[in-house]
Image (cartoon, rainbow, N blue to C red):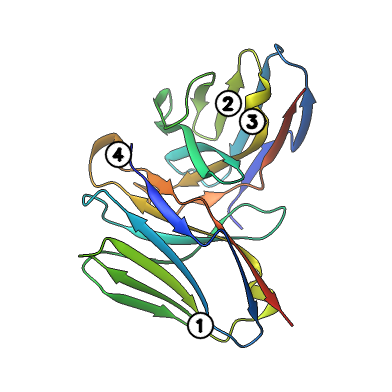
Amino acid sequence: QQQVKQSPQSLIVQKGGISIINCAYENTAFDYFPWYQQFPGKGPALLIAIRPDVSEKKEGRFTISFNKSAKQFSLHIMDSQPGDSATYFCAARGSSGSARQLTFGSGTQLTVLP
Amino acid sequence: DAGITQSPRHKVTETGTPVTLRCHQTENHRYMYWYRQDPGHGLRLIHYSYGVKDTDKGEVSDGYSVSRSKTEDFLLTLESATSSQTSVYFCAISEGVPGELFFGEGSRLTVL
């Protein structure tokens, strides 16, 4: 079974601080790594994504860092804001056949204090 | 927002009763998915569809069946609900091989 392990389970950050969420995977055949953001009562929504041939991708205050050799990737939220308070899920996609579906991490509940 | 409607949004039922959740999309996307979300487990794929009458199992398919008779509708059926199926169920769609998934707002099911 493909797995993506996510940590921490919960994270509390002061406004203006940096939030860091980490994920690790085992399957070297994963070829796409998205992050989803979910607000209470809503469905998850794609936040940012990266492919394994790139080590970093930045969109505004959100950055994915990818370490292929360590099979790890992380989400960094710079200048964290109370509006960023949400649950974040990392995910990975298999590269062939029926495995070409997203496997999600267990989620990180982020709270940004004002 | 992607045109995805889930119904019902909330349901309470008793063990052993059948339950059907409906997902309706207006985007004409080929792929449709059912996930369940549970604390500590994230989102787990139950079943997915890659076209009308074309479906396949996901990671946690036991106890669930699906049907897709029209592009826009994807039904999830629990033939005999159990307490372990208490969860929040999300439908998602994608235009091609995922990719970006667009999620509905979820259906909260409680099995007593």
Q: Which residue is mark 1?
A: A61
Does label 1 lie on the same chain as label 4? Answer: yes
Amino acid type, residue under disc 1 in the picture: Arg
Give whichever of A80, B4 is nearer the camera: A80
Kindly identify which numbered label has been placed on residue A99. 4
Element marked by disc 3 = strand
Q: Label 3: chain? A: B
Q: Which residue is mark 3?
A: B22
| Side of B50 where A85 appears, left or right | right
> Is residue B45 shown above or below A91?
above
> Is residue B27 shown above or below B47?
below
In three-dimensional space, the C-alpha distance between marks 3 and 2, rounded to whole angstroms, equals 6 Å
Q: Quadrant of residue B52?
A: top left
Q: Quadrant of residue A83?
A: bottom right
Q: Residues within 10 Å of mark 4 (few under 14, many from 20)?
A: some
Residue A66 location (% of width, % of height): 31, 70
Q: Nearest to the eye among marks 1 and 3: give it.
A: 1
